[in-house]
Each structure stands twice: as C-alpha cells, then as structure tokens.
Amino acid sequence: MMMFLPLILICVLGIAAIILVIRKDKKSRSKKTKNYKYYNKMFQKYNNFFLTRNGIEKLYYRIAGLSVYTKREIKATAVKFYSLSIGTFWGINIAGILIFRDVFTSLLLLIFAFMAKNVLINKQIDRIHFKLLKQLLEALSSIRQAYLRLGVIPDAISEAEVGPLLKHAFEDIYLILTAVDGERRLEEFYASTPFKLLQTFSGVCFILNNAGDSKLSNGSSNFIQAMGMMHSEVQMEIQRLVLQKAKFGILEYLPVVPLVTLRLIESFFIKQIPGTAIIYHGPLGYISKVLIFVSAIIGYMTITKINSPMVIKKDDRNTFINKLVSNKSFVIFIRNIIPKKPRAIKKKKYYLEKSMSSKDIVYLYANKVICFILAFILSLFFIYFSVELGKDFILSNVREVSLVGGEELDAKDIATRQEMDEIYLNIHPMLSRNRTEDFVNTYLPHLEEFDKKSQIDRLQTKYKTYYNTYFKWWMLLICYVIAFISWWIPEIVLKARIWLLKTEAEEDVLQLQTIITILMNTSADTMETLYWLQRQSRVHRNILIDAYHEYPSDPELALHRLKSKVALPEFKRMVDKLILTIHQISLQDAFSDLISERDHLLRIREITQQSILKKKRSFVSPLSMAPLLLTTVCYIIMPLGILGLKEFFFAIEEFKKL
C-alpha cells in the first residue's frame, strides 16, 4: 500500500491541477463571453444609431474581408476600432476648441478630424494585414516541415503550427481538402477570402491533393516547390512593407505639424509684435489658415493612402453617390451633361477599364458634378466667412497696424476706444483729417500729440479698411476656378488608380505563375489551366473568364483575344506559351523555363519596387513640406513683411512732411 502512495498522490495532484485549469479556463471563457456580450451590445447600439450605422457596417465588412476572425470576434474588433476612431475624432475637436478658441478654425479641424478618424481605422487594419503576412510566413515553413515528415497535404496542414489569425482559415482549407464537396467549399472560400496569398495557397493544396503530388527532376516534390515559391513571395511582400514604413514613417506626420504650431506662432508674434494680431485675425489671416489646413489635409491623406499596404479598393464607389445614381431624375440630368462626342466617351471608358473601377460613365460624371458643387460651396463658405470674421475683428480691434502695436491699454481705454470707433464708423462720408482730429480730442482730450496723430491715422485707416472689407465679385470667380479644378478630380483619381494597379497586376501574374508551376507537373490540359487561372486571378479575372468560355469554340482565337487585352509583357509571354500547348507541345515543355524566369522576375520586381518607393517618396516629399512652407510664408514672412512695408511707407511720408 505504501508503494502506491506516491502514485496516488501524483494522481490526486494531477486531477487537482486539471480541475484548477478547467476552472480557470471556465472563468476566462465566462470573462470572454461577458466581453463578447458587451461588444455585441455596443455593436447593436452603433448599428441602430443613424449617424454611426453606415460607419460600423463598412468597418464590419472590411474586417470580415481579412478572413481571420469569427463573427463574434469581427463584431468585437469592429467595436474596438470604431470606438477608438470616434474617441480620436472628438479628441481632436475638443483639443482644437481648447487651443484655438475660434469657431472658424474649429470647423476646419472638424474636417481634418473626420479624415483622421478614417485613417486611424485603415492603420489598424493594415497592422492586422502585416501580422497576417508574418504568421503566414511561419505557417508555410511549418507546413513544409510537416509535409516532409508526413507526406500527406491535409495531415501537414492539420499538424502545422499556425498563428491565431490564420487558425480559422486553415481549418476551412483542411475541410476543403477532406470533405466530399471540396470544390464547392473552395469556391465559397474564394468568395469570403479576398487575401490573395491565402487564395493561392488553398488553390495549390486543392489541386495537388486531388491530382497527387509528383517528384520533379531535381528530386524535390511539386508541393514543396510550391511552398518555397509562396514563401519567397511572402518574404518579398514583408520586405516591401518594412522598407516602405522606413521611408514613409516620418513623412506622413509632417503635414500635421503646422496645425499644432499655428496657435504657438500666433501667441509668440502677437506678444512680441502686437500689430500682427490684426493680420492673423483679419481676412488675410483666415484665408491663410484655410490654405494651410487644406494643404495639410491633402498632404496627410495622400501620404497615408500611398503608405498603406492595401492601396487599391475593389469597390471604389461612394454610398452617397450610389444612392444618387439610383434616382431616375438625377440620371437623366447626368446623361444630358455627358459629352456626346464618341472620342471623349471612349477616353473616359478607357480610364474606367484600365483602372478596373466599379464605376460606369454615369457614375463618373455624377462624381464630377458632386465634386464641382462641393468645392464651390466649401470655397464660397470659407471665403465669405473669412471676410465676415475679418470685418468683425476690424470693428472690435482698437490697436494700430504697426510693428509695435501702439500704446499700452487697460480695459477702460479699450472700452472708450471701441465706443469712439463705433460712432466714427457710423459717420458718412468719412471725416477729413482736421475733423477727425476734433473727433479724437472730444473722446481722448489728454493724449499726447504723437499718440493723437496715431489715433487719427488709425481711425481713418480703420474706416477705409472696414468699408473695403466685403465679398467682392472676383472672390466668386475664385470659387468657380476651385470648382472647375475639382471637376477633374475623379479622372485624376482614376489615373492614379491605373498607376497603382500596375503593381497589383504584377503580383497577380506571380500568383498565376505559381498555379501554372503546379499544373505543369499534373495531367492538366490548356482548358483546365485556364479554368484554374480565372478562379485564382483578381486583376485579370474578367478577361480570363472570357477566354475560358470562348476556348471550346475556337481555342486559338480565344487566347489571341486574351493576349490583345493585356498590357504586361510577362502575361503576354505566358499567353504565347499557352497557345503552343493547344496542338504542339505539352504544358510541362511549354513552361519548362518558368522557374528560372520567375526567379528573374522576382529579382527585377524587387529592384522595381525599390525604384517605385523612391518615386513615391519624391512625389510625397513636396506634399509633406507644403503645409510647413505655407505656414512659414503666410504666418511668419507675410505678416512681418506687411507691417514692415507699412512702417517703411509711413516713415517716407513723415520724411516728406519735414
């Protein structure tokens, strides 16, 4: 009995430890369940409130598109990100109100805060995307080792060490490989998983699991080679993102710096040179603020967009414009303003096709109209209120427009001068200099002669400036010029999308080459190859679907048409080889040099990526510096220059009198 005591004691301790772990697990699960209940409740609140409904739904589908979370986790993540973005939005606005204490500037900050809120959400999703790539890199290495040990693809996927973000996706892939309706599940997986590398991985596993793995001439297996190719692709993508972050890390925050320093610059110069207050709080100062804020918003948004790893959106349409184009009366109006010349229409359609946009010609012109109207209204609003707020400041200001700002005034002196100014401004026409002197003597009889002259000059200058400050006809012309420039923004966006899509197209060709290297070692024919290519592709999907359906009637014509629709030389070469496989040689012979060609393409692409990053940096550098330059010119050089010139001309006039 004594012999079994240690064994019994170990068993009891073991059972106690298991019970303790189970209880802890239950507690953590109940805690998680409570958290999920809270997040679900918050999600429903956001979804039911009309101002937050659209934002939370968009964020929900974007996170779902990553294909790494369950429904409960998606809701929890969406609530976290959306709450953080709303907190940032109100935080920026409250900070702006406390710092600037100005309605006009607070409205400008409101626009910036709205943009920053969306950028913050994008950055959170980009971080998940980067984590996903790192976990996929580790998973591919683990699968390769597991396959070498086990020799069965489903078992290798099941046994591999996979990160938490990829767990659900790999469970789905395992079911695709083992279930009877695997092809249907694969189709569903493609539809629910926009992450292209996971799509390629699932396609490779499905093809080789059905066709069987084969040994290559170098002794390696087809599956191991595919994993190596995918591993190098993921490595290169991570390398690109790290390099991009290093090059763009500080640049994207430079446009925001002036927004923080504007109040500090104002306070410093008003304290040192009181006369600058009239310029900062006048029409010129408000217009300068608008220019600085607009340049900061454009710079910040452009740089963060280019710096994002997921630049191209599949659906680039706006919800508001979608609702407008569903209105028949609005569509009739848009069709009336669409150019009737076939050449102009052909050019616009070319941009839409090349950019792979979800828009059509009606949507494009609806977008142009909205940009025109919005730019006109906003420019009119800001120019008009800049003038009106400047006029109000001129009315309330009693200081001189000079480098020194005149005499020191207490509250009583300020009140006296404000009363005097109001009466003087209501006199029509403006009093002559002698009568103005008598007017000043009435209200300020104890002033010294020099200060009296300063008050006369101040009153006459104030009278002229006050009645000359109004919304002039040429300001309306400026609004129209801004609106006409904005008319071309949708086309500029399409051209930028075409430029960005080139990189996306190169990545798509790499994915297609991976699929071909798998198929060339199986018994697949040309039509089956087209079938898998059209299922795998994202950028070239539509043209590949057309080629696949045309192939049975006329194979050569279908592939020649496919070749005429593509621009990339690598894709054209790939189609040329597919043409040879119709009657002349096998798929394996046609693509025998694909591995070496692909390695060469990867090296070229790496060099090209570095070149593109340099071009992007050279493009965004002026955008990042523009707000700083405008702040220097409009908030430092211009006020000091205006006051300096005024003092210079005043000195010349005084010299002439002598």
Image (spheres, rainbow, N blue to C red):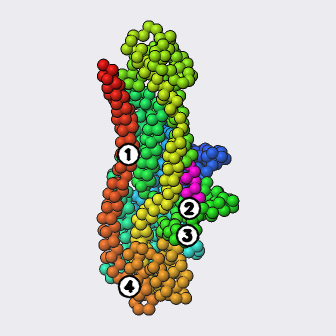
Tell me which segment is drawn in magenta.
Answer: 363-375
How far apart in space, not on screen, are marks 3 and 1 (Cα)? 39 Å
Q: Residues within 10 Å of mark 2 (few under 14, many from 20)?
A: many
How far apart in space, not on screen, are marks 2 and 4 (Cα)? 43 Å
For the point 41% across and 66% down, the residue is 502
How far apart in space, not on screen, are marks 3 and 2 (Cα)? 16 Å
Mark earlier in primary sequence (4, 3): 3
> Which residue has dot 4 on it?
590
> Which residue has dot 2 on it?
364
Q: Residues within 10 Å of mark 3 (few under 14, many from 20)?
A: few
> Which residue has dot 3 on it?
341
The answer to whether 186 is drawn above or below residue 314 in the figure is below
Residue 27 visible in the snapshot: no
Mark earlier in primary sequence (1, 2): 2
Amino acid type indicated by mark 1: Ala
Q: Callout 3: helix, strand or loop? A: loop
Give whichever of 277, 564 is nearer the camera.
277
